[in-house]
Each structure stands twice: as structure tokens, then as C-alpha cells.
Image: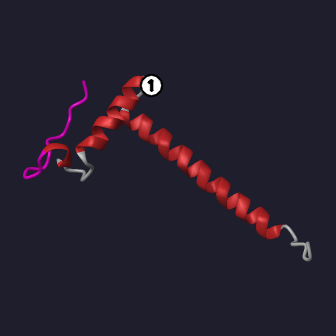
């Protein structure tokens, strides 16, 4: 089983944060989603980031296409 880091002292309940500064509830949700998909938390986060980067680059490509398309006036 994956070792879970100690929470920062002084926080209580769902507001506890690990040394990374990420709220405990985020760690719990990521772990649940990763377990459902049979992935490690690292690979799940990597997948999320890769999908986000792909969507951002698609937005940039779309903006470039829009700026290169000649605008027709008077419609």
C-alpha cells in the first residue's frame, strides 16, 4: 500500500493539509478515482494533466485558425 504523508499539525477535519499543501479531501478523491480505474495516483494525475495540455493546445490551434481566416464583412 502507498505510504500516506503525515498531515500538517494544527489543521482539523477535511481542512487538514499534507506537506504538499493539498487539502486532504483532494488526496482522498484522487485515490478513490485512481483505485476505480486501476491506476496509481501519479498516473491518474499525469493523465489529467496530459488531457488538459491537449485541450489547451487545441484551443491555441483554433485561435490561430480563426485569426488566419479572412473576415467577411457586411453579413
Give coordinates of residue 71: x percent, y percent. Answer: 86, 72
In the image, residue 73 above or below residue 41: below
Magenta stretch encompasses residue 3? yes
In the image, residue 28 above or below residue 35: below
User: Considering the numbered disc 1 on the image, is that residue within a helix, a strand or a loop?
Assistant: helix
Quadrant in the rendering for residue 59: bottom right
Rate crowding at label 1 as few (under 14), some (14 to 19) or many (20 or more) other CA atoms within 10 Å.
few
Q: Looking at the picture, tell me which residue is in the foreground, 73 or 71.
A: 73
Instruction: Decide if residue 17 is in sight here.
Output: no
Residue farthest to the front? 75
Q: Is the magenta stretch mostly helix, strand or loop?
A: loop
In the image, residue 62 above or below residue 12: below
Task: Give the mark count.
Answer: 1
Instruction: Decide if residue 13 is in sight here.
Output: yes
Q: How is the image coloured?
A: secondary structure
Give coordinates of residue 33: x percent, y percent. Answer: 39, 31
Which residue shows up at 90% across the image and 76% down it?
73
Magenta stretch encompasses residue 11? yes
Give coordinates of residue 26: x percent, y percent. Answer: 31, 43
Which residue shows up at 78% across the image and 62% down it?
65
Quadrant in the rendering for residue 24: top left
In the visual, does 75 lie left or right of 13?
right
Quadrant in the rendering for residue 1: top left
Give coordinates of residue 8: x percent, y percent. Answer: 13, 50
Residue farthest to the bottom? 74
Which residue shows up at 53% across the image and 45% down it?
50
In the visual, does 51 lie left or right of 30?
right
Residue placed under numbered mark 1 in the picture: 37
Quadrant where the C terminus sits is: bottom right
In the visual, does 1 lie left or right of 74?
left
Region of the chain picked out in magenta, as a range: 1-12
Q: Looking at the picture, tell me which residue is in the foreground, 69 or 42.
A: 69
Amino acid at each position: 500500500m502507498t505510504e500516506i504523508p503525515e498531515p500538517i499539525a494544527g489543521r482539523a477535519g477535511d481542512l487538514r493539509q499534507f506537506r504538499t499543501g493539498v487539502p486532504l479531501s483532494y488526496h482522498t478523491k484522487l485515490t478513490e478515482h485512481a483505485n476505480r480505474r486501476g491506476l496509481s495516483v501519479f498516473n491518474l494525475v499525469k493523465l489529467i494533466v496530459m488531457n488538459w495540455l491537449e485541450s489547451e493546445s487545441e484551443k491555441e490551434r483554433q485561435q490561430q485558425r480563426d485569426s488566419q481566416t479572412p473576415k467577411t464583412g457586411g453579413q
